[in-house]
Image (cartoon, rainbow, N blue to C red):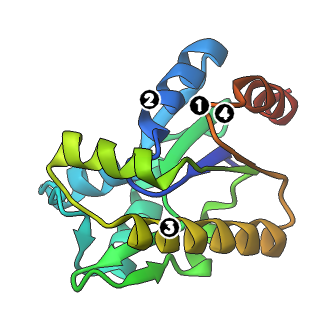
Amino acid sequence: MRNILFIGGIHGVGKTTVCRDLSNIYSLTYLSASEIISKVRKEEFTKNKKIDNIDQNQSILIDALDQYTSEEGWVILDGHFCLLDKYGVIQRIPTCTFSDLLPKAIIIFIDDVKEISIRLKERDDNVLSVEYLHEFQKKEVNHAFYIAEKLSVPYLICNPNENLEELYKFVETCIK
């Protein structure tokens, strides 16, 4: 059985940067759900973050994960609890995806949506309103909480720009 520490949060919250740091600090394997899906599909996701076939992509992730993980050691999987469909509507990732992943713990990153908006504009030239990002982050956190409760796994909601010590303690507790 894989030991997955699932780290979620909306686009632009800083998951990739912090996940890579955690991977280096604790010698954990780091994987990005979107990179795995892109490799299997042999296509890149668009910078507008809108996804066609969310359910199919999640099936691809589950099927491909065995190629990237072993039964020993811990894996940090950077992903989402909600995504934007091709119309820009916020959609929850199906619960069965997480039941199949069986994460041992969940971390949800949050940040000031004004900061996230600036990052998305600078990084992807993607302009999303603060109100929209607020709703997106709220749905992401709510669905993450639901999944953690449903799977009976520990979880942490944190802003990695403000409470790194709390994050480190949580990770250390999970992987020991």
Q: In the displayed structure, does residue 82 sit left or right of residue 109? A: left
User: Which residue is labeled 2 in the image?
Assistant: 17
Q: Tell us which disc is closer to us: 4 or 2.
A: 2
Camera-nearest residue between 126 and 63:
126
Three-letter code for the amino acid on which mark 4 is drawn: Trp
Percent position of residue 129, x then y:
32, 67
| Residues at discs 3 and 4 in contact (Cβ within 8 Å) | no
Q: Tell us which disc is closer to us: 3 or 4.
A: 3
Identify the residue at image location x=24%, y=71%. Answer: 50
**Disc on res. 134:** 3
Percent position of residue 37, x then y:
30, 57
Identify the residue at image location x=28%, y=49%. Answer: 120
Give neighbour class at mark 2: few <14, some 14-19, many 20+ (Cα, 10 Å). few
User: Which residue is labeled 4 in the image?
Assistant: 74
Using the rendered view, name the quadrant where residue 130 is placed.
Answer: bottom left
Q: Is residue 117 visible?
A: yes
Percent position of residue 22, x then y:
59, 24
| Residues at discs 1 and 4 in contact (Cβ within 8 Å) | no
Q: Is residue 59 visible?
A: no
Identify the residue at image location x=62%, y=79%. Answer: 95
Q: How far is mark 1 from mark 4, CA to CA?
A: 24 Å
As helix, strand or loop, the secondary structure at mark 4 comes to strand
Three-letter code for the amino acid on which mark 2 is drawn: Thr
Identify the residue at image location x=67%, y=73%. Answer: 142
**Which of the marked residues, 4 or 2, is nearer the chain's N terminus?**
2
Percent position of residue 160, x then y:
61, 34
